[in-house]
Amino acid sequence: MNHGSSVGELAKQLRNELDRYSPGGKLPSSRALVERFRVSPVTVSRALAQLAAEGLVVTRPGAGAFRAEERAAAEPAGDTSWQEVALSADAAAELVPRAVDASAVLVTLTTPPTGVIELSGGYLHPSLQPERAMAAALARAGRRPGAWGRPPIDGLPELREWFARGMGGALTAAEVLITAGGQSALTTALRALAPPGSPVLVESPTYPGLLAIARAAGLRPVPVPVDTDGVRPDLLAAALKATGARVFVCQPLFQNPTGAVLSAERRPEVLRIAREAGAFVVEDDFVRRLVHEDAGPLQRPLTEDDHDGVVVHVCSLTKATSPSFRVSALAARGPVLERLRAIQVVDHFFVPRPLQEAALELAGSPAWPRHLRNVAGELQSRRDTLAAAVRRRLPELALPHVPAGGYHLWLRLPDGTDEAAFVAAALRAGVAIAPGRPYFAAEPPAAHVRLSFGAASGAAELGEGVERLRGAWEAVRGGRERLTS
């Protein structure tokens, strides 16, 4: 069994064999299972834990694992139809009904079935994550004095100072709040800045998670087009004037999904336009630590050029580490900081102190800069591999921009292509990709897909993924030709 599927495969085999044992009967020992299935003790332990979570097995320390007693017959299901009336009545009372839809976000969070190549993921492959460094940092953090006590509400002062330095030094530690991941920070920012029913300007295309946050809060996302130099200032000014919006959310560095970088010429224009409109700019600086080896000097955060408190800054450690290392920062200056702090406290209280201590241990260790250098080289190599394979095997798909940071490519499909059919055909061919439609707040100008090179295991898997996409593309194109003939 390979490492990625061994736990699931062992659990499956043990599940199929449970009928051999009477309720309460003892299963073979862990040592016997290790020898029989030729897996590690950790794999056996995790497989048994999975069966225990399913209620099929009971584990007793020192005694072993036993088949669970037969379950009592389930009671008849209740009638939850009343909730449809209650939830619709709640929506009818709002100016803009909330739409709590996580489907687009789940595309990047759901692990594909075994055998499917993941080109849809939103996080680094485990081989690129600093697992040993994080484990060591967490172990050291757990031994720190007071590590398991209640942290300061705003976050550990040393961690706030570390984030403030990473933002360029324009903001102080007193203007930084520690939050539980970028998604949480964005949610807090939108709740603080935009009342339900109001418009919020977003880049087009943009991260589906942001659209989900806005709609769940009863906000109206209004798209502002992006090109290779970032958001267009003329269209931003027009959108602010037409809608009266007081919030614009953007990703100036390696924008998701286009990979665009807001140009040096446009940066002051964006800040000036927002300031004159009395609007906030929420800067989602989500992949500054995922630059590629050939990136060159980076544009500094917008906060460095903001003297009037226009920018609310969001940055996170999660993308550069692990999906479970949910430590981020939310920074602002002026009266808005108190509102951000109040919402953060009401919604979350605080980020667990051991995780904050671990972040400090990791960021201060020699392993951290080594990890970032390694990721920079690996991401450039994988980007080049995927881009070359796409251009060679899928020349019909336009790749207008190859970014120098982040972990994805944004491809435009030929006019008339059925985007959903291509994504479905790709999955049947054994490769998961992200459809482009969820990245648009309004009607998209064309069909797109996003391919991630950060979630794959390496160059071989990327190449195989494109080969499978070639077959899916030919199947979709063949069907299209039959329809038009």
Image (tube, rainbow, N blue to C red):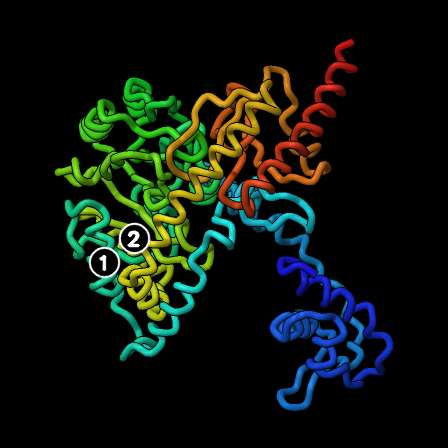
Residue type of the residue flagged with mark 1 = Arg
**Viewer-side residue, 307 vs 8:** 8
Q: Quadrant of residue 194?
A: top left
Residue type of the residue flagged with mark 2 = Ala
The reply to whether residue 453 is in sight is yes
- Looking at the image, is mark 1 or mark 2 earlier in the sequence? 1
Asked whether, in this view, residue 28 is left or right of residue 322, the answer is right
| Discs 1, 2 touching: Cβ within 8 Å | yes
- Residue occupied by mark 1: 160
CA gap, disc 1 and disc 2 = 8 Å
Residue 232 placed where, x, y %? 32, 21
- Residue occupied by mark 2: 329
Residue 462 placed where, x, y %? 58, 38
**Viewer-side residue, 239 vs 305:** 305
User: What is the crowding at mark 2: few (fewer than 14 residues within 10 Å), some, or many (at least 20)?
Assistant: many
**Compared to 200, does 340 lie above or below?**
below
Q: Quadrant of residue 47?
A: bottom right
